[in-house]
Image: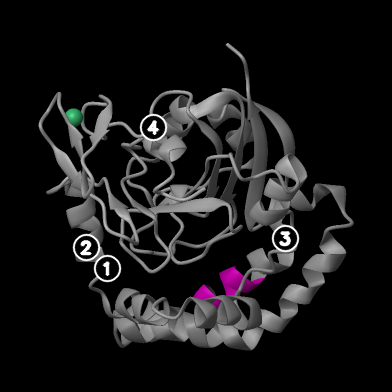
Amino acid sequence: MKISDPQFINILSCPLCQNDLHDRKDNMACEQCGMSYPIRTSAIYLAPKGDQLLRQYREEARSPINRFKALIKTWPWLFDILTLAIGSVSFFGQSAKTTIKKTYGNNTQDKIIINIGSGISRPHPAALNLDIFPFKNVDIVASATALPFKDNSVDMIISESTLEHIPDGETAIKEIMRTVKPGGMVYITIPFLMPFHASPNDYMRLTHEGLKQKFSAFEPIKIGMRGGPASALITFLMYFFALPFSLISESAYNFATYFFMVILSPLRIFDLLFFLFPKSIETATIIYFVGKKKNI
Ligand SMILES: [Zn+2]
């Protein structure tokens, strides 16, 4: 699916008043509230101007570590390689890509799959990336708390380690439940045992039972660890060893966490072993939830 596809244009709605949008070539217009949203060749901008959330994100993104991260993210391939090579999380559990393949096989052409809080990573060629920041590879610039889609219109929503960064995560969850079609799917990952990590801020954790409860409109299909107990331990230790550096400055502390991440990251291999133990999910670093929307 492309953002220019009429099937996709047809599901768009005004993020402010949820009325239908009309295609005006270089913008999408709402006749109800008069807002117009620009369409560029690379992306469609549906984040309300002056949105308080967007302003807050922009402010937080100015810290040195977040600016460093943003710099790395201008090269998506470099970011992906770094995450794989020296990250703190093993990501051995079921991925978004595998979930899309298992659900649709190769028949993804007419499926609307939205990846919320994508950053620069596209999990599958068929997925449309949505983010509040216009990073590279973002197709839809919009807020997760005011999704620009009609009720029951999206085939699948993916959200990987994003909900914890949204100040009003509860509203984002309600928006996902509103926009996915009955019978449609979600693939959600969220940290469980992970220290505070601002990107650009951090507000929430959920357990495997918490995910089931929050996404109650969805029948759980599969719940598991995306990153296991070894990843949880590494992430804890990298922040733990960096603590003394916080006496120097916040930047020194932030950069120390990255230093210890590089040192400790080979230990992630132990997660392969932990995936054999049924109780590992109780000390996992990131949990995933695959759900199918119930017919109400
Ligand atoms: Zn409107």
Residue at image coords 35%, 37%: 147
Dot 2 amino acid type: Arg
Q: Earlier in the sequence, mark 3 or mark 2?
A: 2
For label 4, count other residues whose C-alpha is less than 10 Å away and answer few (under 14), some (14-19) or many (20+). some
The label shown at residue 290 is: none
Q: Earlier in the sequence, mark 3 or mark 4?
A: 4
Dot 3 amino acid type: Gly
Mark 1 to mark 4: distance in Å?
Answer: 33 Å
Nearer the camera: disc 1 or disc 4: 4
Mark 3 to mark 2: distance in Å?
Answer: 32 Å
Q: Earlier in the sequence, mark 1 or mark 4?
A: 4
Residue pointed to by mark 2? 58
Dot 4 amino acid type: Asn
Residue at image coords 62%, 55%: 286
Query: Closest to the observer: 13 or 87?
Result: 13
In this rendering, position of residue 31 left or right of residue 145: left
Residue pointed to by mark 4? 10
Which quadrant does ligand 1 occupy? top left
Magenta residue check for 177: no
> Does residue 266 appear anywhere in the picture?
yes
Nearer the camera: disc 3 or disc 4: 4
Are discs 2 and 1 less than 8 Å apart at CB?
yes
Q: Earlier in the sequence, mark 1 or mark 3?
A: 1
Nearer the camera: disc 3 or disc 2: 2
Q: Which residues are magenta?
A: 234-239
